[in-house]
């Protein structure tokens, strides 16, 4: 082959690989979020969980109880302020705050092991809902 043609093929191959890598990185970044800004893990919640209402929504006592539980069970990964440490989600982000209370309770109950989030199904439902109430108060 002609040297110019080899150089052109090499340049085109390099550009295609570079573009594929960039597109792949952007696709991977987008894959953690749904179109509505919610985290993909939350979008896996079944409809009945998604529409579940928080029995403690907006109650100051529940927010305080949820904060105490958060510090005991969640702050190690999500930080004292809920902004996330390492791989843990920023609980103040739109991806979390746009979630319904039912989606958040479902995620607490089921966890997301692929992202390092354990299941908190051992906590009574009342306590999970109190944590959700606190997390929603972080807006």
Image (cartoon, helix red, strand yellow):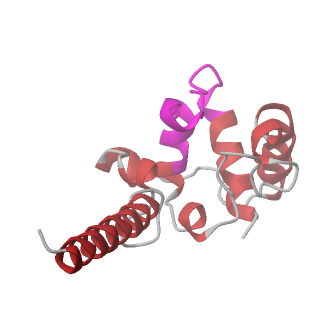
- Residue drawn at x 64%, y 52% as measured from the top left: 89
- Residue drawn at x 39%, y 58% as measured from the top left: 31
Q: Work out whether 27 lies above or below 132.
A: below
Q: Work out whether 76 lies above or below 51.
A: above
Q: Nearer the viewer, residue 59 or 134?
A: 134
Residue most toward the left? 1
Residue most toward the front? 2
- Residue drawn at x 77%, y 58% as measured from the top left: 83
Residue 103 image position (x, y, % from top left) = 47, 50
Q: Is residue 17 left or right of residue 26?
A: left
What range is drawn magenta here?
Answer: 104-126
- Which image quadrant is residue 70 in? top right
Report if residue 52 is visible in the image: no
Magenta-colored stretch includes residue 118: yes
Q: Is residue 90 left or right of residue 73?
A: left
- Which image quadrant is residue 124 in? top right
Q: Is residue 45 left or right of residue 97?
A: left
Q: Work out whether 51 lies above or below 95.
A: above
Quadrant showing the C terminus = bottom right
Q: Is residue 64 left or right of residue 22?
A: right
Q: Which of 73 and 116 is in front in this view?
A: 116
Q: Work out whether 17 lies above or below 62.
A: below
Magenta-colored stretch includes residue 3: no
- Residue drawn at x 76%, y 64% as measured from the top left: 138
Q: Which of 134 and 42 is in front in this view?
A: 42
Quadrant showing the N terminus = bottom left
Residue 110 image position (x, y, % from top left) = 48, 31
């Amino acid at each position: 082959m002609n040297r110019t043609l080899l150089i052109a093929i090499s340049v085109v191959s390099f550009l295609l690989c570079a573009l594929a890598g960039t597109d792949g990185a952007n696709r991977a970044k987008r894959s953690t979020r749904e179109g509505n800004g919610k985290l993909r893990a939350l979008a896996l919640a079944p409809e009945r969980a998604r529409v579940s209402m928080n029995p403690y929504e907006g109650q100051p006592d529940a927010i305080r109880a949820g904060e105490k539980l958060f510090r005991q069970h969640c702050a190690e990964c999500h930080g004292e302020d809920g902004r996330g440490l390492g791989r843990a989600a920023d609980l103040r982000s739109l991806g979390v705050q746009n979630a319904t209370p039912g989606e958040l309770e479902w995620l607490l109950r089921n966890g997301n092991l692929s992202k390092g989030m354990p299941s908190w199904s051992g906590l009574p439902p009342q306590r999970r809902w109190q944590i959700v109430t606190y997390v929603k108060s972080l807006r």
